[in-house]
Image (tube, rainbow, N blue to C red):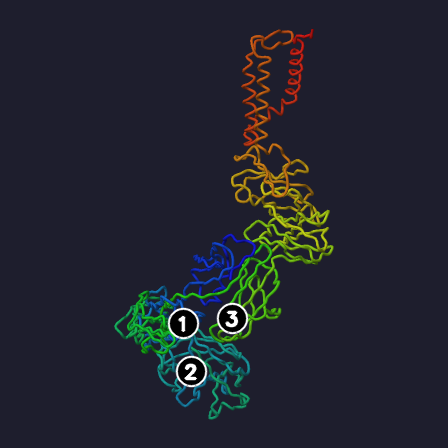
């Protein structure tokens, strides 16, 4: 119900859209009303800044019915379910269900490393549409030649043991060198460029023997110096640990047996074993493995082939379904990227190439599922489409108004059951719409200093944990009251623990309700905060009108004040007037951080006053400033400035109602000087400080095109008689008449009598013409200020001389008039 006991004229009403949607279950498009006299009305609903706005043609007591539509739109995947409720089913109509095709996608990138140039990798593409890649193009395949790597070439002979060991002994027993060999099987083809040996023991002294290294494709046979020499004269460091040996390039094939032979030479011929480098195995059968010379210790040999150079050429890749792409030859470490037109039938990535190297690849692929066989079920009633819908293709499904219930469940399924589990879940774009209307009682009122809601909702089914959200239209600083009642019962207050106010949104927790219950909530929020006191608003100001609120002081302390920072007029100078107490001297204290406090120093309990504003915003850049209003005017506003805790703060003064393209000055009436000036561009901001003085925004009479317009009285009086055009016109007429009298006195052939010269003929009509025109120019000057500054400057400079001359002329004229007047004696 919308009700206003004070004003009956029609006006626009705004209600929080969120609260209305929560109450109705949908967003209305039109509102229908019935006045208390029975007459009907209807208006369209608009939305602005989260508010539902409509026009009430005559404001009395109204029962409002909201009319709109229930709409479920968007993308729904297979198995989706959504529910909604209606409190009235009588007006469900125009029920329609439309479905549109859309493709769902899912990335399934694949990467592999260390592939032989002729390797084949299986590939499975899910979905029912050809896959895509980056930028919606074909899948993207990147192939890299894995050119440099390290491979451990110590291989097993199949028994799980490491069967080879390397022993390097110098001057052993009889001044002879000892050689050793090791059998290896490389696990990758390539060219050997480096060997790494792990030396486990270094006994005795380093007498400087050297080692030649050979390699031959055969098993060990204790014959040394066979095959290809890949290193000559290696002088090992006589320390334990790994030692790297650079060797000549030697090509090896994977899984092929090779023997590396180590041939030592050099001796000091002293007949004793004084040096030993050895890498041994763990085999207990090796008689020398437990020789006391080695302390009975065991060690693992570690021979590694590193820096293998490999290249691959003539590389191509096919998908097993007739599609292939060629990559050509690769240089060491080269990477190439190409697109490949894969399909749901593609089953593999078959690599074909030549060379001893191996390859890495990454496939960027996005699987896709199109809309197939969409089905929509409404409260058990099923409607569907058979077939595939391309993207954006729309079909209408059958629908019946009778399917809609008070509580509704809508289920969506998509797909024919042939998609694999790892395919993108198919989806459909649903447009589910029907009209609905619902009678809701909503009593809303908005004032400058407070805002009220009264919302009523009838629930169609049982609910638990019911909450009501009310987004207040303006800034509020607190909740004055919240009450609820059920089924028209007694109103009861809501405890503070059962509601919360976050910024401007109020949430009220109402617990559980039964189906059919009508729950009402009424609340009032305040926009002003009274510190160390309390007030009661006796005559509120409706939001949208100029502030003119009357209030009563209920309690007041010495430092009490009213914070108006959350009101619609927070940016303006607020002032109190018509106070019932004497010596009111009210003022506003405005701070740089946005606070606006109104102080009433002489107020006391029981007193009354009114609060209003002038169109001036005050913004100190730091600290605070005090402002008050003695002569309230909305045009060319005037106000009193005083410093706050500290003087000298810079202050921005903004004239909110300044006329565009009009030049203004900010004048100090106290000191009769202009503090700043500027041309308005909706609005006008001029800068000054917080020095104690009276300031006024005035139109510049020289540069303003629109002329000086007298102040508009809004509670004060300018006291300027020239503000009346009637007075100015009468003055012009009197001046013209005076000049005419002068014309009659001194005009004519006798003309003017000039001392020491005599009579000079003077056309007296010129006096009347010049005087009349001059008077008219004065009037034009008053209203438009168009006398040139140059002329004004000349007048200013010669003014004193002209004044003395004018006085002399007047005295001379009077003397001549009375000297020549005849004397008449009454006989």
Q: Quadrant of the C terminus?
A: top right
Q: Which of marks 1 and 2 is in front?
A: 1
Q: How crowded is mark 2: few (under 14 residues within 10 Å), some or many (20 or more)?
A: many
In the rendered image, the vertical position of residue 9 relative to residue 799, given as above or below: below
What is the CA distance from the residue labelled 3 to the residue labelled 1? Answer: 79 Å
Which residue is the site of mark 1?
148
In the rendered image, the vertical position of residue 178 relative to residue 531, given as above or below: below
Displayed quadrant of residue 793: top right
In the rendered image, the vertical position of residue 757 relative to residue 691, given as above or below: above
Which residue is the site of mark 2?
154
Labels 1 & 2 near each other (Cβ < 8 A): no
Nearer-the-camera pick, 464 or 552: 552
Q: Which comes sooner in the sequence, label 2 or label 3?
A: 2
- Where is residue 642 shown, x and y percent of the image? 69, 45
Q: Which residue lies furthest to the left in this view?
A: 322
- Where is residue 614 shown, x and y percent of the image? 60, 46
* Element carrying mark 3: strand
Nearer-the-camera pick, 401 or 794: 401
Q: Which residue lies furthest to the front in this view?
A: 827
- Where is residue 222 shown, x and y percent of the image? 40, 86
Q: Which comes sooner in the sequence, label 3 or label 1?
A: 1
What is the CA distance from the residue labelled 1 to the residue labelled 2? Answer: 19 Å
* Element carrying mark 2: loop
Label ID, residue 518: 3
Left or right relative to 27: residue 770: right
What is the CA distance from the residue labelled 2 to the residue labelled 3? Answer: 86 Å
């Amino acid at each position: 119900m919308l009700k206003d006991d004070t004003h009956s004229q029609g006006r626009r009403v705004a209600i929080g859209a969120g609260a209305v949607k929560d109450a109705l279950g949908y967003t209305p498009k039109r509102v229908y009303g019935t006045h208390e006299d029975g007459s009907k009305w209807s208006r369209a609903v608009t939305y602005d800044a989260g508010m539902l706005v409509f026009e009430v043609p005559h404001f009395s007591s109204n029962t409002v019915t909201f009319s709109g539509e229930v709409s479920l739109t968007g993308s729904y995947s297979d198995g989706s379910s959504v529910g909604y409720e209606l409190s009235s089913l009588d007006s469900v109509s125009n029920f329609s269900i439309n479905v549109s095709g859309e493709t769902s996608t899912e990335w399934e990138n694949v990467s592999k490393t260390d592939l032989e140039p002729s390797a084949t990798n299986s590939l499975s593409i899910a979905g029912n549409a050809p896959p895509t890649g980056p930028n919606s193009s074909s899948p993207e395949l990147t192939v890299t030649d894995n050119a440099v790597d390290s491979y451990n070439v110590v291989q097993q002979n199949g028994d799980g043991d490491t069967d080879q060991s390397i022993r390097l002994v110098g001057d052993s027993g009889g001044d002879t060198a000892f050689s050793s060999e090791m059998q290896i099987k490389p696990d990758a083809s390539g060219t050997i460029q480096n060997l790494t040996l792990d030396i486990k023991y270094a006994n005795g002294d380093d007498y400087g023997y050297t080692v030649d290294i050979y390699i031959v494709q055969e098993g060990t046979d204790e014959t040394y110096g066979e095959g290809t020499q890949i290193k000559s004269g290696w002088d090992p460091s006589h320390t334990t640990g790994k030692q790297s040996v650079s060797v000549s390039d030697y090509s090896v094939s994977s899984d092929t047996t090779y023997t590396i032979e180590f041939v030592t030479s050099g001796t000091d011929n002293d007949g004793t074993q004084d040096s030993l480098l050895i890498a041994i195995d763990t085999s207990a059968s090796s008689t020398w493995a437990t020789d006391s010379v080695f302390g009975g210790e065991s060690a693992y040999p570690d021979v590694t082939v590193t820096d293998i150079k490999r290249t691959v050429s003539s590389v191509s890749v096919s998908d097993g379904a007739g599609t292939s792409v060629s990559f050509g030859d690769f240089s060491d470490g080269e990477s190439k990227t190409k697109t490949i037109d894969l399909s749901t039938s593609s089953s593999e990535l078959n690599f074909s190439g030549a060379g001893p190297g191996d390859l890495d690849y990454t496939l960027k692929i996005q699987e896709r599922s199109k809309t197939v066989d969409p089905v929509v079920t409404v409260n058990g009633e099923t409607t569907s489409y058979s077939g595939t819908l391309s993207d954006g293709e729309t079909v209408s499904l059958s629908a019946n108004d009778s399917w809609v219930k008070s509580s509704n469940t809508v289920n969506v399924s998509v797909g024919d059951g042939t998609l694999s589990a790892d395919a993108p879940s198919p989806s459909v774009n649903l447009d589910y719409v029907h009209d609905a209307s619902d009678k809701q009682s909503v009593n809303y009122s908005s004032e400058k200093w407070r805002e009220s809601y009264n919302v009523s909702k009838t629930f169609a089914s049982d609910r638990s944990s019911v909450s009501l959200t009310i987004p207040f239209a303006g800034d509020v600083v607190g909740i004055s009251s919240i009450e609820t009642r059920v089924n028209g019962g007694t109103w009861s207050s809501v405890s503070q623990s059962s509601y919360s106010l976050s910024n401007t949104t109020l949430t009220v927790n109402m617990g559980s309700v039964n189906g059919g219950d009508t729950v009402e909530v009424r609340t009032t929020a305040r926009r002003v905060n009274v510190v160390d006191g309390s007030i009661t608003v006796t005559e509120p100001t409706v939001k949208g009108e100029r502030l003119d609120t009357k209030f009563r002081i209920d309690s007041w302390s010495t430092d009490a004040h009213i914070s108006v920072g959350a009101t619609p007029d927070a940016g303006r100078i607020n002032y109190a007037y018509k106070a019932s107490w004497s010596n009111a001297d009210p003022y506003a204290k405005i701070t740089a951080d946005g606070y606006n406090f109104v102080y009433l120093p002489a107020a006391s309990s029981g007193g009354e006053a009114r609060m209003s504003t002038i169109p001036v915003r005050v913004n100190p850049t730091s600290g605070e400033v005090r402002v008050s209003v003695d002569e309230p005017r909305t045009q060319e506003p005037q106000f009193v400035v005083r410093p706050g805790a500290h003087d000298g703060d810079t202050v921005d003064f903004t004239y909110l109602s300044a006329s565009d393209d009009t030049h203004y000055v900010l004048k100090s009436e106290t000191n009769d000087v202009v503090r700043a000036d500027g041309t308005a561009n909706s609005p006008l901001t001029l800068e000054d400080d917080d020095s104690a003085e009276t300031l006024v925004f005035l139109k510049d009479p020289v540069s303003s095109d629109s002329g000086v317009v007298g102040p508009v009285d809004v509670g004060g009086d300018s006291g300027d008689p020239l503000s009346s055009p009637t007075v100015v016109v009468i003055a012009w007429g009197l001046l013209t008449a005076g000049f005419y009298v002068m014309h009659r006195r001194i005009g004519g052939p006798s003309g003017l009598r000039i001392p020491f010269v005599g009579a000079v003929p003077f056309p007296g009509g010129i006096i009347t013409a010049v005087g009349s025109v001059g008077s008219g120019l004065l009037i034009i000057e008053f209203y438009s200020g168009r006398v040139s500054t140059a002329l004004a400057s000349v007048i200013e400079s010669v003014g004193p001389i002209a004044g003395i001359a004018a006085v002399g002329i007047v005295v001379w004229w009077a003397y001549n008039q009375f000297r020549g007047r005849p004397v008449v004696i009454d006989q």
